[in-house]
Amino acid sequence: MEWLTPLIAVYAAAIVLPLFVLLYFLKLRRREQIISSTLLWKRAVQDLQVNAPFQRIRRNILFFLQLLMFLAMLVAIAQPVLSLIGGPSRRYVILIDRSASMNATDTGTNRLDEAKKEAKTFVESMRDSSFFSVGESGDQAMVIAFDNRPKVMCSFTSNKRQLIAAIDMITATDGRSFLAEAVTVAKAFAQSVTTEANNRSAEEPGKLLLFSDGCIEDIDDIAVGKEELSFYSIGKSGENVAVTAMKARRSYETPEKVEIFATLSNFSKQEISTDVQLSLNGNVQAVKAVRIPPREAADANNKGRAGNVAIDFSLSYGERGVIEVRHLYKDKLATDDASWSVIFPPQKLSVLLVTGGNAILESALRACPIANLKVSNPGEYESAAKALAGAQQAYDVIIIDNYIPQNLGRGRYIIFGRPPGGIDVTAAEELKDQVIIDWRARHPVLNYVNLENLFAAQCIKMNLPRDSEVLAEFNEGAAMAMVRRNASIYLLVPFDILQTNWPFDSGLVLFCYNAVEFLAEEGATGRISELQTGQALIVDGFTPETEAKISGPSLDEKEVKAGSSGSIIFDSVDRVGIYSLNASGQVPRYFAVNLLDNRESDIEAVGEISLSGEVVKAQQGDVRRANFPAWPFLTGIVLCIAILEWLIYNMKVRI
């Protein structure tokens, strides 16, 4: 047993108990009255003797009941706590999932609130440091919230109020759930700072407590020791219908015509019929009824694939606008009920290819939907670029093939071969016989591009700045990288495609198509690429120190400023919807943020998770309490004694 506030109880006893006993020694002042006989007043005489000063206290049941009541009150003030788990104090890391699936409302409010409630119950049950336990401290805990990235809400402390306040500060997002980085951070904090001989810790490692529904993207990348992690599964129902894919594009043949394609997924076990509506700038344009098949039957290895149905719309619109596809079925998760896309006025792409002669690259570009493709040699380009003197280039995208330009104006560039100067990128050395070992398949430039078999006989190893974006990697260096400098974007491909096997792969045409489209949209006024929740927003084309405001579902005119490179970089957007960026004297720029993630939309809570082969089953029942406060029961005992004393007193009065 531990006593939380024993000194307060001791001080109260030193004051209250002597005064209480003294009351029984005080002589009562009574009014004198002449009577004929004292025969019927024997009890009154005895009462006078009891209340006479300096007399021995006679046996009085009321006195002992009142004394017992005061003792119980004093013990309750000392706050005794019964420890249900023995052993030394421990350190805990509380991991709370706040991703999109935790917004599901199948638990009454939402899953995040339920996870926070259970986490606070655990914090309240942690063992406190005892007044009489010399040299022993109470349990400690820290709180980490995670979605796309972890956020430390509170470092290790035994202060329960601070821990509960940190848990209350966790807010929901629409991001995806990535746990590996959070576990890495948790292990780093939980590492004991005291060591014995041979660098072995004198304390047990910190215990990880995971409060989640188990819808975790990188579950296979996490490794934990046996009994190192306890999993508390949050959630009941898996009923959900989601928009899991959506694309709006203008027809190449008829630019005024906009075609919209979407995929709806049913994660329930029964077929669902619902309406899907198409809206343009907030006005409903069309409604279609769809029937979505149920998810496939689950087996021992997976939960079963969701039932899918494709739907398409078309409309005629030649201006800039916001398109929304929304299903009208009422399910448990509203985050993925809709998806958005920003369309722009039709334009004809103009691309300049600067090359000494590359029929393969020219052929790949002519296979792309480019309205104007001009091929120029290096000499012609230098003369034209010198005349512009660093001003904005006249082409949407400029492709430089195996040539180092001397004059670069503001624009969007794809550069094959050695990188140019003036963009903080240098060539370290030449590499030979390189293969692609990894690439960002989700980036718009590499969407549906398979680089698995790409081999380069020769390439340049680049020294890149810290703010560069590596899209693909060779075994000894970056294979593709994006650098933003001087209000320009440079897509660097440090090899000559004629010294690779890429010309024999259809992926070259798809890469050219994606890269030209991406750079053209990034460079066009008011055009912003579509993002997923958690991605960084990067907008170029501003003069340094330009001030702007970003507004959206989770932002209310947040002020931002362009850096020295003319780019505005906003860390991340964590809510789905349409965001706008407004800079003084410029047309507002819009971009759409969507979830479009099957893992997060599949909200069925799991009963166990597998972490690198280590199966962790969800804890059954409520969070186990490590200690039990006894003062509420002592308060009840005080109340019972008071009632008993009142009954005995009234019985004596009637006698």
Image (cartoon, grey):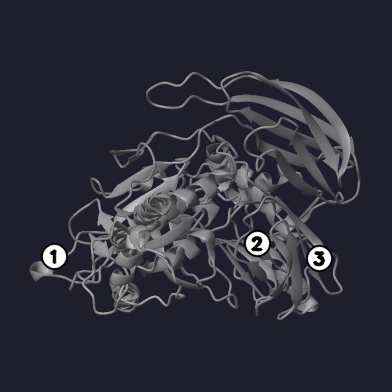
- Residue carrying label 3: 394
Compare marks 2 and 3 and give the one earlier in the sequence: 3
Q: Badge 3: few (under 14), some or many (20 or more) residues near its Cα, within 10 Å?
A: some
Q: Is residue 456 above or below residue 587?
A: above
What's the residue at 62%, 56% (across, down)? 574
Left or right of 572 on screen, residue 125: left
- Disc 1 is placed on an element classified as loop
Indicate the amino acid at tag 3. Answer: Ala
Residue at disc 2, secondary structure: strand
Category of crowding for the residue at label 1, using alpha-carbon neighbours closer than 10 angstroms: few (below 14), some (14–19), many (at least 20): few
Residue most extreme to the front: 36
**Residues under numbered marks 1 and 2 in contact, where contact means CB atoms less than 8 Å apart:** no
Assign the N terminus to one quadrant of the image: bottom left
The residue at which mark 1 appears reads as: 200
Identify the residue at image location x=23%, y=52%. 85
What is the spatial separation of the Cα atoms under label 2 and label 3, in whole angstroms?
26 Å
Q: Which residue is mark 2?
A: 537
Q: Nearer the viewer, residue 272 or 55?
A: 55
Number of the front mark, 3 or 1: 1
Q: Earlier in the sequence, mark 1 or mark 2?
A: 1
Q: Residue at x 90, y 50 (%)?
A: 319
